[in-house]
Image: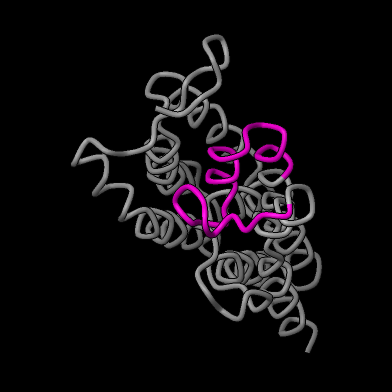
């Protein structure tokens, strides 16, 4: 029973749509009508800048971290993985938005990874920042980092549930970015300017 509650709790945590709630509370606006229409942290950052984007990203990270941590505490690595995966599913299809399209799971997956494989998570953060600084495409940084996540959990010999989480989670994150991949191929993907210039979107 405890294992099932941990997984259900992970889904409910993941379903908390901070990317929708924060702009609603602060700006009285629906993020789904702006930018890409996505309720994830990247779109919030794109539309409103760091003042709202960073808090939303941290909250989305926290959802995955808390869900996976509780799962680990209650049932060990397998339940930690299932609870973290449930949080990712909740983020993608949140019950609090009536199962409508949510976010692309990257931040929530990152939070779960911090609980399940902290060394891998730290390396992935460094890689994401480096790729983003070089390309200024959040989608490219996320896709590259997802691939690296899958490779690292295998290379560092984590328990099989965490290896499975890394591989399946990476595939899921990349699949959720299929529209970004199409825009990258077409040369129409959103590109962020670095703050040292003027904070705006190309």
Q: Is residue 7 magenta-colored? A: no
Q: How many discs mark residues in the rendered view?
A: 0
State the extent of the magenta-drawn residues as a range: 28-55
- Whether residue 101 is situated above or below residue 149 in the rendered picture: below
Residue 43 coordinates in the image, percent (x, y): 53, 46
Q: Tell me the quarter of the picture where residue 136 sits.
A: top left
Residue 10 coordinates in the image, percent (x, y): 70, 71
For the stretch drawn in magenta, the main secondary structure is helix
Residue 32 coordinates in the image, percent (x, y): 54, 59
Residue at 52% x, 10% y: name it: 197
Residue at 64% x, 67% y: name it: 87
The residue most toward the top is: 196
Q: Is residue 43 left or right of residue 118?
A: left
Given residues 64 and 192, the one toward you in this image is 192
The residue most toward the left is: 186
- Whether residue 32 is situated above or below residue 94 in the rendered picture: above
Q: Quadrant where the C terminus lies? A: top left
Q: Tell me the quarter of the picture where residue 142 sits.
A: top left
Given residues 14 and 198, the one toward you in this image is 198
- Whether residue 142 is situated above or below residue 22 in the rendered picture: above
Q: Is residue 189 left or right of residue 122?
A: left
Residue 151 coordinates in the image, percent (x, y): 40, 44
Q: Quadrant where the N terminus lies? A: bottom right
Residue at 26% x, 45% y: name it: 183
Q: How is the image coloured?
A: one colour
The residue most toward the bottom is: 1
Q: Is residue 43 magenta-colored? A: yes
């Amino acid at each position: 029973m405890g294992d099932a509650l941990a997984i259900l709790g992970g889904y409910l945590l993941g379903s908390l749509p901070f990317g929708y709630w924060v702009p609603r509370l602060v700006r009285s606006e629906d993020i789904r009508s702006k930018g890409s229409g996505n309720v994830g942290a990247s779109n919030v950052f794109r539309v409103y800048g760091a003042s709202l984007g960073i808090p939303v990203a941290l909250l989305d990270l926290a959802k995955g971290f808390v869900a996976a941590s509780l799962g680990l505490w209650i049932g060990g690595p397998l339940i930690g993985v299932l609870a973290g995966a449930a949080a990712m599913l909740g983020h993608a299809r949140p019950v609090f938005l009536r199962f409508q399209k949510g976010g692309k799971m990257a931040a929530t997956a990152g939070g779960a990874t911090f609980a399940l494989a902290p060394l891998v998570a730290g390396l992935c953060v460094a890689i994401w920042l480096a790729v983003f600084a070089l390309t200024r495409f959040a989608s490219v940084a996320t896709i590259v980092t997802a691939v690296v996540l899958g490779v690292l959990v295998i290379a560092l010999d984590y328990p099989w549930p965490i290896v499975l989480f890394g591989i399946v989670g990476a595939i899921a994150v990349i699949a959720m970015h299929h529209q970004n991949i199409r825009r990258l191929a077409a040369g129409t993907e959103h590109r962020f300017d670095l703050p040292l210039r003027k904070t705006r979107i190309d």
